[in-house]
Image (tube, rainbow, N blue to C red):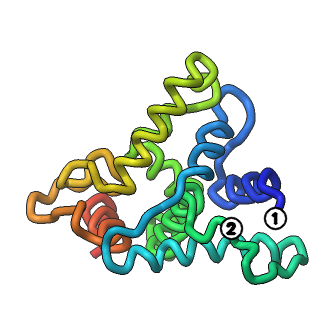
Amino acid sequence: MNGRDYLCWLMNQGQINAEGPDGYLRLCEIMNSVYFVSLVAFDENRAEEGKALREEWGESRGDILEPGTLIPYTCTMLEMIVILGRRMEYEMMDSQFEAGTGKWVRELLENAGLAYFRNDIFDIDPEYSANRIRKILSDIIYRRYGRDGTGGFFPVTDRNVDQKGEELLIQMNNYLAENYDIC
């Protein structure tokens, strides 16, 4: 599996601009090197969906990936954000908010505070940027964000919802229902 080709394919799936000062190549490189850890029941299903992107990529190239080529055996955070963006797009299909996977991926990056780390910002202080990105991703993985989801992918204002204890799919549904009035 060619890592650079796969990274570009993932960025294309998430409609993430790679090049230029306002691109996110460096952010995506780091996100693709940080592995998701499932700490809440059923989040492993999202991780499996993320890993399935590798097979989809192989099929798009006419390759058949042999078992064991899916190293690492867990989903990366870039794969996770692409999967979540696709899920959001699916949930919003046929609504007034249908906008493509890229819209949702950008929203997730914004919510988590990752959208700040464009290539031009990264170039100013690469070490700080890389460390900060890893810290944000770690906080998301280990659920060190606000009870309301602030600092994670799915912040809500509903005081009765504890986003930290919910699986990502429930967090997403809480977020969409609150912010897009779909229920």
Between residue 37 and residue 47, name the one nearer to us: 37
Which mark sits nearer the N-terminus, 2 or 1? 1
Crowd band around label 1 with a 10 angstrom C-alpha radius: few (<14), some (14–19), many (20+): few
Marks 2 and 1 close (CB-CB < 8 Å): yes
Against 40, is 137 above or below? above
Q: Is residue 170 left or right of residue 125?
A: left
Visible residue check, residue 67: yes
Q: Residue at x 46, y 79 (%)?
A: 45
Against 69, is 5 above or below? above
Marks 2 and 1 sit apart, C-alpha to C-alpha, by: 9 Å
Position of the N terminus by quadrant: bottom right
Name the residue carrying label 2. 71
Q: Residue 168 location in percent, x, y?
A: 36, 68
Assign a secondary structure to mark 2. Answer: loop
Q: Of all residues shown, which one is farthest toward the right?
A: 62
Between residue 183 and residue 153, name the one nearer to us: 153
Q: Residue at x 14, y 59 (%)?
A: 158
Q: Is residue 96 left or right of residue 27?
A: left
Q: Is residue 47 left or right of residue 147?
A: right
Against 50, is 9 above or below? above
Q: Amino acid at mark 2?
A: Ile
Visible residue check, residue 173: no
Assign a secondary structure to mark 1. Answer: loop
Q: Amino acid at mark 1?
A: Met
Name the residue carrying label 1. 1
Q: Residue 66 location in percent, x, y?
A: 81, 81
